[in-house]
Image (spheres, grey):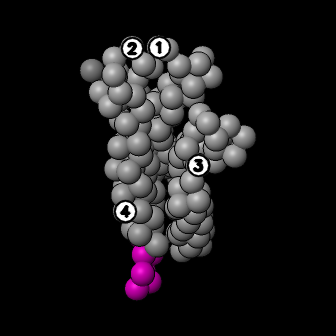
Amino acid sequence: MARSGNQGASAPAARAYPSDRIEERPAAQGIMRWSFVLTWFMRVVAVLWIMKGLSAWAVILGIWTPIGQFEARSTGYQATVIYFALIDLIAAVGLWMASTWGGIMWLLAVMSHLILAAFFPGIVSGGVLTVAFFLTLMAVYLAVAWLAAREI
């Protein structure tokens, strides 16, 4: 098969666009590579968020509670648990892949948890320790992401 002249020229042009994956960015020459720190921070948080998402699924499936208790709860409680069962695992996958959308989905999941905990404390647990932990994780993520963006 003969190749057209346009196919060879499109490959370098396609690589000219930056990837949204953090580990595919060019490496900095500094002592501390903040993109490396960001990637591993995101992966550690991804493991935590996988556990958080799976715990929501455990509530839905009746693993930690008696079977049928989830269905007996209010519709607001059921919707909230299902929401976190989905968004936490989606955010965890994005964080593990160290992609930009993963960080955004994770920030959405954390902010959703904090807002719902503030306005609906009977549905979403929001103790002082949980809020402080989530706010600390957010601050560290934003700081490391900012430092990683500056090293490019």
Between circles 4 and 3, the one closer to the viewer is 3
Q: Which numbered circle lies on residue 126?
A: 3
Give the mark, 3 or 1, whose residue is nearer the N terminus.
1
Please name the amino acid that badge 3 sits on.
Answer: Gly
Q: Which residues are magenta?
A: 26-33
Quadrant, the N terminus: top left
Q: Which mark is residue 32?
A: none
Q: Residue furthest bottom?
A: 31
Out of 3 and 110, give the one closest to the viewer: 110
Q: Are marks 2 and 1 in contact (CB under 8 Å)?
A: yes
Q: At numbered mark 4, what does the secondary structure look like: helix, strand or loop?
A: helix
Q: CA distance from mark 4 to mark 1?
A: 38 Å
Is 106 located above or below residue 134 in the figure?
above
Residue on which disc 4 sits: 40
State which quadrant residue 60 falls in.
top left
What's the residue at 41%, 42% (across, down)?
52
Query: Few, some or many C-alpha atoms within 10 Å of disc 2 (few <14, some 14-19, many ≥20)?
Result: few
Q: Which residue carries the number 1 mark?
A: 71
Quadrant housing the C terminus: bottom right
Which residue was labeled with disc 2? 68
Residue at 51 percent of width and 33 percent of height: 84
Tell me where residue 50 appears, x and y as whole percent.
Answer: 36, 42
**Badge 4 local density, few (<14 within 10 Å), some, or many (20+)?**
some
Q: Secondary structure at mark 3?
A: loop
Tell me the chief SS of the magenta region: loop
